[in-house]
Image: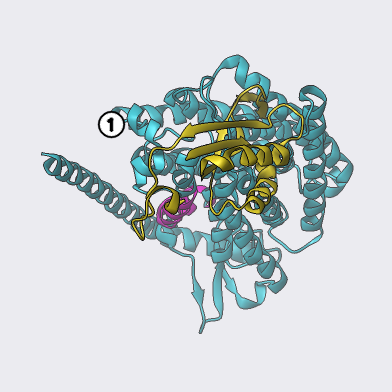
Chain colours: A cyan, B yellow
Amino acid sequence: MRIDLKRGQRGRSMARALTGSIAAIALALACSIGSVRALADEAPAAAAAESTATAAAATPAAPTEPTVVGFDKINSGDTAWMLTSSALVLMMTIPGLALFYGGMVRKKNVLATLMQSFVITCLVTILWWLVGYSLAFTPGSTPYLGGFGHSLMNGVVYMHDAMKLSVSHLGTTIPETVYAMFQLTFAIITPALICGSFAERMKFSAMLWFMGLWLLLVYCPIAHWVWEPSGWLSVKGVLDFAGGTVVHINAGIAGLAAALMLGKRQGLGKESMAPHNLTLTVIGASLLWVGWFGFNAGSAVAADGRAGMAFAATQIATAAAALAWMFTEWAIKGKPSVLGIASGAVAGLVAITPASGYVGPDAAVIIGLAAGVICYVSSTSVKKAFGYDDSLDAFGVHCIGGIVGALLTGALVSKDISGLDGSVLTQLWGVGSTLIYGFIMSMLILKLVDVVIGLRVTADQEREGLDISQHGESIE
Amino acid sequence: MKLITAIIKPFKLDDVRVALTALGVSGMSVSEIKGFGRQRGHTELYRGAEYTVDFVPKSRLEVAVRAELVEPVIDAIVAAAKTGKVGDGKIFITELERVIRIRTGETDLSAL
C-alpha cells in the first residue's frame, strides 16, 4: 500500500517535471520565431540606417541598439573591470545571499533556503539567454518592453577572423557578452532577494514557477523602463545608477506580495523562530558587501573616475548605515546585536545603490544614516504593527531602503559628478510605478501559481521542515 | 550500589572530573543538556522579535559507585562544582539494581 502510494507520488512529480520541460521548449520555440521575424525586419532597417549614416558621416551618432564594431573599439581596462564586476555580483547571490538568508532560518530549513538562491541562479541564467536579455536591454517597439530580436542571444557575436564583435549601446567599450553577463547577475539576485519574504513555507515547485514568470513579466519590463534609453522612465529622467528601483524596490514589493499571499508561518509569535546560525549570516552579509562593489562601481560600465566615486560612496554609506542601525538598536533595546549591524550594512548598501555614481561622500553619509534608522524601524516596529510575516525582511530592508535611496538620490544628486539633473518628484515616478506594477503583477502571478499548483507546503511538511519535505535531505 | 546523577554548570565539568578521578572513580558518562530550576533563562532579540529562552545549557554527569563511595563522591562534586550563585545544579542519588559489563559478562561490584 505504502509502496503504491510512493509510486503514485513519483508518477505525479515526473508528470510535473515533464510539463515543465514542455513549457520551456514551447517558450524557446516562440522566442526563436520572434527572432526570425526580427531578422526579416532587419534588412530594410539596415538599408535605412546606411542612408542616414552617410548623411551624418561627419559626426557618427551614439548607437541606440547593440552594434558590431572592430576589436580596436574595445577598452581592455573597462573589460577587465566588468568581467571582475560580473563575477563579484554573482558571488553576492551564491554564496553571499544564500548564506545571509540561510543563517537566519531554523535548522530544518537551511538547505531549502540555500537551494532557492542556487536554483534561481541556474533558472534565471537560462531564461536570460532565452529571452530575458533581449526583453530588458534592447530597444523594442514600445517604451514598455524590449524587443525579441536578441532572443537566444541572437546577434551577440565575437568574430575572430573579421576582428569584429558586438557591443551593447549601453556599454560601447566592452564586449556585449560581458555586458549581457553583467546584467544577468543583476537579474539573478533580484528574484533571489524575494526569497527572504516567504522563507520556511513555500513549495519548491511553486517557487520555481513564480520566479520564472516574475523574471519575464516583472523584472525584464522594469529593467527596460529604467535602464534602456528608450524605456519610458529613462526618458522621464528617473535616476537609478545601479538598481535601487529595478532591483531593490522591485524585489521588496514582490516580497510583500508573497508574504501577504502565503500568510504567516505556523507558530509565529508562539514558538521560537530564532536564526539557527548567525555566523553564516555575518559571512553572507560580508560577501554581499564585497560583491556590492561589482554591483555599484561596476554600474559605471567602465574602469573610470565614476566607478571610483561609486566605490567610495558605497563603502561610506554602508558603514554609516551599519553604525546607525547598531546605535539605534542599542539605544532602544539595550544591546548592539550582530544581526543588527549586518542588517544595517545591507540596508546601507541598498540605499546607496541608486545614488552611488551620482553623489559624493558627504551625501553618502546622509543616505547611509537615513537608511540605517528607517530600515531598523520598518523591519521591527512596522512589521509588528501590520502583522505580515516578511520572514527575513526582504520588504523591510530592500523595498524601504530602496525607496529611501531613490528619493534621496533625487534630492542629493551632484551635477558635477553625474552631469545630470534629478528631482525628488521625478524619482517618485520611478518609485510609484515600480511599486504599483510590481505589486499587482506579483500578486497576479502568485494567485495564478496558487490556483494551478498551490503556493504553500502542507502543514505537516512545514512542521517537518522544507529540507526533508522538499529535498529529502537534512544537515544533521 | 548507587547511581549518582549530577547536573552542573558546563564550565565546572573538568574540575569535577579531576576531583572524582582522584577519589578512584574509574568511569563516568557526560551529556550536554538544557533545563531550568531556580536559575532563569534569558531573552534573545532578533530584529525586534523577542524570544525568552527558558532552558539553560548544563552538563549531566552520571557515575555508578559502590555504597561506601557515595558520600565522598557527593562531597567532591559539591566542592568542585560550587560557585555559590544560583544555577550551580543538583545531585540525584538512585538505587542501582544490577550492573553488567558487556565485554566479560561480569556483574555488579566487579562490573563497576
Quadrant of the rendering where the N terminus of chain A is positioned? top left
User: Which residue is label 1 attached to?
Assistant: A452
In this picture, residue A132 sits left or right of residue A185: left
Residue A425 in sight in this render: no
Residue A439 horizontal/vertical position (percent)? 51, 27
Residue A49 horizontal/vertical position (percent)? 53, 60
In this picture, residue A288 sits left or right of residue A16: right
Residue under the image location 84 percent in, 35 percent down? A366
Which one is in front, A337 or A194? A337
What element does badge 1 sit on? helix
Near mark 1 (Cα within 10 A), the count class, few <14, some 14-19 or many ≥20, is few
Looking at the image, residue A58 lies above or below residue B72: below
Which one is in front, A150 or A204? A204
Looking at the image, residue B19 lies above or below residue A202: below
Q: Specify whether residue A130 is painted magenta.
A: yes
Q: Specify whether residue A195 is painted magenta.
A: no
The total number of labels drawn is 1
In this picture, residue B97 sits left or right of residue A232: left
Looking at the image, residue A465 lies above or below residue A70: above
What amino acid is at disc 1?
Val
Residue A272 horizontal/vertical position (percent)? 54, 27
Q: Which residues are magenta?
A: A117-137
Please tell me whether the stretch drawn in magenta is mainly helix, strand or loop.
Answer: helix
Residue B75 horizontal/vertical position (percent)? 67, 38
Residue under the image location 47 percent in, 44 percent down? A141
Query: What's the chain of the residue with tag 1?
Result: A
Residue under the image location 66 percent in, 58 percent down? A62
Residue A136 in sight in this render: yes
